[in-house]
Image: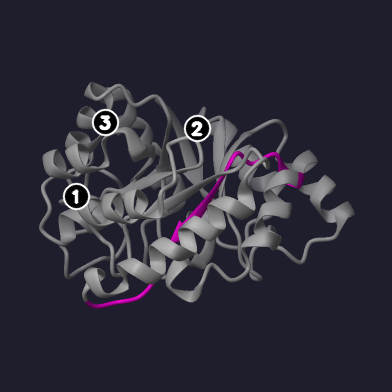
């Protein structure tokens, strides 16, 4: 396993400053949030994309965190695939989307994922579905991936440590459900399922250490990404403190 940081925790920060910050914490990998209010988005020109790679100063890009939603038919996927190619990103994070009963949404979402995998074939970009939205548990995402007919080289799962736990699925169960689909682990911390202001990892109640221990025991060797949701919470703990906490957590496990 290796540690990375999502730019969700430092919204709008220029990429050269992101690179300096991560180097200071001895973190060599980054996940880039893709949105119009960020330095990285699908509207970047060719020159802007080259400049972004230069600004990252050799950081390993583990993936692009997109807001492409399967329940919306994966609209915008083609543009994000092009961006991933230009930035050298090996993966795109997709959101399952929707709310309510995942069983009702499973058919449309899995069909959209199957079409997305077909579009991405040959690109070298893996499509990763996060435990989120109407599919917060490992069991939900596993069913979605299996129903799509994709294989592990084409699609995988992002285990967001918060959402399965928040939905009542134990880390042991999530680890079993995601199994060979696991491609990324996201760590973050909050005070409780109801109070989701981002805290320094280790200061809250999310079972991050157990999640990482289970992933490691299962042979996971991919990225562990700090996703500090400062973009949504102005009173979030400072990103430098959060990275330092994630570093301590990762090194301990």
CB under 8 Å between discs 2 and 1: no
Looking at the image, which residue is at 58% across and 52% down?
Answer: 118
The segment highlighted magenta reads: 86-100
Check residue 62 in the rendering and tell me which mark sits there, or answer none: none
* Neighbours of disc 2 within 10 Å: few (<14), some (14-19), many (20+): few
Locate residue 92, reporting x and y percent.
Answer: 55, 50
CA–CA distance in space, label 2 to label 1: 22 Å
Q: How is the image coloured?
A: one colour
Res. 106 image quadrant: bottom left
Q: Is 98 within the magenta?
A: yes
CA–CA distance in space, label 3 to label 1: 15 Å
* Neighbours of disc 1 within 10 Å: few (<14), some (14-19), many (20+): many
Residue for badge 1: 206
How many discs appear? 3
Q: Is residue 153 left or right of residue 171?
A: right
* Mark whose residue sits in front, 3 or 1: 3
Sooner in the amino-acid sequence: mark 3 or mark 1: 1
Say which of 63 and 124 sits in front: 124
Res. 103 image quadrant: bottom left
Q: Is residue 111 visible?
A: yes
Q: Is 40 within the magenta?
A: no
Q: Is residue 10 visible?
A: no
Residue for badge 3: 215
Q: Is residue 38 above or below residue 240?
A: below
Res. 125 image quadrant: top right
Say which of 227 and 203 sits in front: 227
Quadrant of the rendering where the N terminus is positioned: top left
Residue for badge 2: 25
């Amino acid at each position: 396993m290796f540690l990375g940081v999502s730019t969700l925790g430092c919204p709008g920060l220029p990429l050269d400053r992101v690179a300096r910050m991560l180097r200071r914490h001895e973190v060599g990998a980054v996940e880039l949030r893709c949105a119009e209010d960020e330095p990285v988005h699908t509207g970047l020109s060719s020159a802007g994309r080259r400049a972004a790679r230069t600004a990252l100063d050799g950081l390993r890009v583990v993936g692009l965190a997109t807001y492409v939603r399967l329940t919306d038919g994966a609209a915008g996927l083609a543009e994000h695939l092009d961006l991933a190619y230009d930035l050298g990103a090996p993966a795109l994070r997709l959101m399952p989307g929707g709310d309510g009963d995942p069983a009702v949404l499973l058919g449309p979402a899995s069909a959209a994922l199957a079409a997305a995998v077909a579009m991405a074939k040959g690109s070298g970009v893996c499509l990763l579905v996060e435990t989120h939205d109407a599919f917060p548990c490992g069991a939900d995402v596993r069913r979605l991936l299996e129903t799509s007919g994709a294989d592990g080289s084409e699609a995988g799962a992002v285990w967001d440590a918060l959402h399965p736990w928040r939905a009542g699925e134990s880390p042991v169960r999530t680890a079993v459900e995601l199994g060979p689909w696991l491609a990324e682990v996201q760590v973050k911390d909050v005070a409780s399922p109801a109070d989701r202001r981002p805290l320094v990892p280790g200061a809250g109640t999310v079972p991050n250490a157990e999640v990482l221990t289970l992933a490691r025991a299962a042979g996971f060797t991919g990225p562990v990404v700090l996703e500090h949701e400062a973009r949504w919470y102005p009173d979030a703990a400072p990103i430098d403190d959060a990275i330092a906490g994630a570093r301590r957590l990762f090194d301990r496990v």
